[in-house]
Structures are given as C-alpha cells and as structure tokens.
Image (spheres, rainbow, N blue to C red):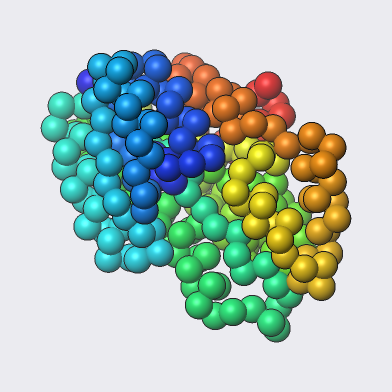
Amino acid sequence: MKYAVITGSSRGLGAAVAQQLVAEGINVISVARHENTELKQAAAEAGTGYMHFTCNLGSEEQVQNVFSEIAETVFKDAEQVFVINNAGVIEPIEVAGDLDSSLLMTNVQVNLTAPIMICNSFLQKAKKTAVETVIANVTSGAAERPIHGWSIYCSTKAAINMFTMTAGLELEKAGSSSKIVAFSPGIMDTDMQATIRSSSEKAFAELETFKNYKESGSLRSPETVAGALVKLLLGSHLENGKVYKVNDLL
C-alpha cells in the first residue's frame, strides 16, 4: 500500500496535489482544519483509500497527537509513504517593530515547527519499519531574498530549507532509502495571494507588483504546479536535501 499524507489539503496546492495522487491510485490522508468534500468524493469514485484528520497546525499538542495517530495507522501496512508539508501562513505582513506577537508565533509554529515535528515523527517510524518515506516540504522563493514586510515568512521558509538540506545530508550518511526535499512552487493563484493583495503598501512595499501578477495573468494554477510536484515525487531521481524549483520542472 502507498500512502500520501498532505497538510493544507482542503484548498489550493494541497487540494490539487491530493486530487492528482488519488488519480494515481495512492491512498490519501488529508490533514486540514476543514475537510474537502470534493476530494473525499474523488477518492470514493477512484476506489482509493481516504481518511481526513482535523488538525490546527498552530497547536503543538494537536500536531503531536494527530500525526502520531496517522503514523501508527499508515506504517502498519505501508510499502511507501509520501508526506507533503504544504500548509503555510503568510501573516504577519508588517515591518519589524510593528509585528503582532500572536501572528508571529503562529507563523513560526505552522511554517516551521509543525513541519519539523511531522518530519521527525515520520522519519523515526520509517527507520523502525524500514519503509521508504518521501517527504516534500513546500517552501518559497522568499526563503532566498529579503522581502519588505515578510520578515517572518522569509525567515521560516529559509529555516525549513536548511532543515531539509541538513536532514537530507543525514539520511544520505545513514544509507537510508528515505528522501526529503523542499519544493518551491512559485507564484500561484491561491488564497494566500489574495491575502497578500489585501495588505497595505506601508506594510508591504511590493504590493503593486503582486497585484499586477493577478491582473496580468502571471499566476500559475495550483493544478499546474501540483502536476510538477507529483511528477517529481513519483520519479526515481530525487536528490536528498535538494530545494527543487517549479520553474526548473515545467
């Protein structure tokens, strides 16, 4: 049995990836605050396994409990496990000195702490069971350059890249069959982009540029980006610890 655990699977890139993996006959474990009924229906029609777990990734306790349960479930009969840490938040969009502490803490928990906890849990299980596990951490080009108003988002994405590269190095040194990579999806037409466009120019200097992405049709569809990620994960040439960029895959 092959399983794919996908966070943020209720919409956007996560939903698109889940739909495409269902089409590939892979059992999908959906993790989000709300269930995607279209995904549930697609899995039923395809005859593939499907489960949904409600989880607030902003809660360390929920992440620990929910993903321990998921790991226990999938590793019982898995021959291969995929984990796509897709969920993320952009807020707070604000300059340093005006950051909201609550939003700051949530960003770090959702974008960095939760994915690391999930990776740690699944790599531990993979080692104990000798089940090949393939992890993709969704990152951003913001990890590689400073962006006005995005100090926390840039920082958490840079950190998840370094975690991925280091964990990949460790897996290679251990001779593990498991893989961990990061995937930078570029700019997509998602709810996160809508959040960005609703910010103020005072808080986010590149506001007009991002508005123009939408108006000029420059935003890729989540389905297109999901296709690149799914093809990458199902291929046989993943390089441990590498940060893959969608522009190099399309």
In the shown orientation, is residue 214 left or right of residue 131?
right
Give the quadrant of the C terminus.
top right
Q: Quadrant of residue 85?
A: top left
Residue depicted at x 54% and y 80%: 101
Residue 177 vs residue 125, the one in the foreground: 125
Res. 95 in view: yes
Q: Quadrant of residue 196?
A: bottom right
Q: Residue furthest left?
A: 76
Residue depicted at x 18% and y 48%: 69
Count of marks overlaid on the render: 0
Vertical relation: 64 (above or below) 29: below
Res. 117 in view: no
Q: Residue 64 location in percent, x, y?
A: 26, 58
Residue depicted at x 55% and y 58%: 89
Q: Residue 218 location in percent, x, y?
A: 79, 35
Q: Quadrant of residue 249?
A: top right
Residue depicted at x 82% and y 67%: 201
Residue 175 vs residue 31, the one in the foreground: 31
Q: Residue furthest bottom?
A: 97
Give the quadrant of the N terminus.
top left
Q: Residue 152 location in percent, x, y?
A: 62, 66
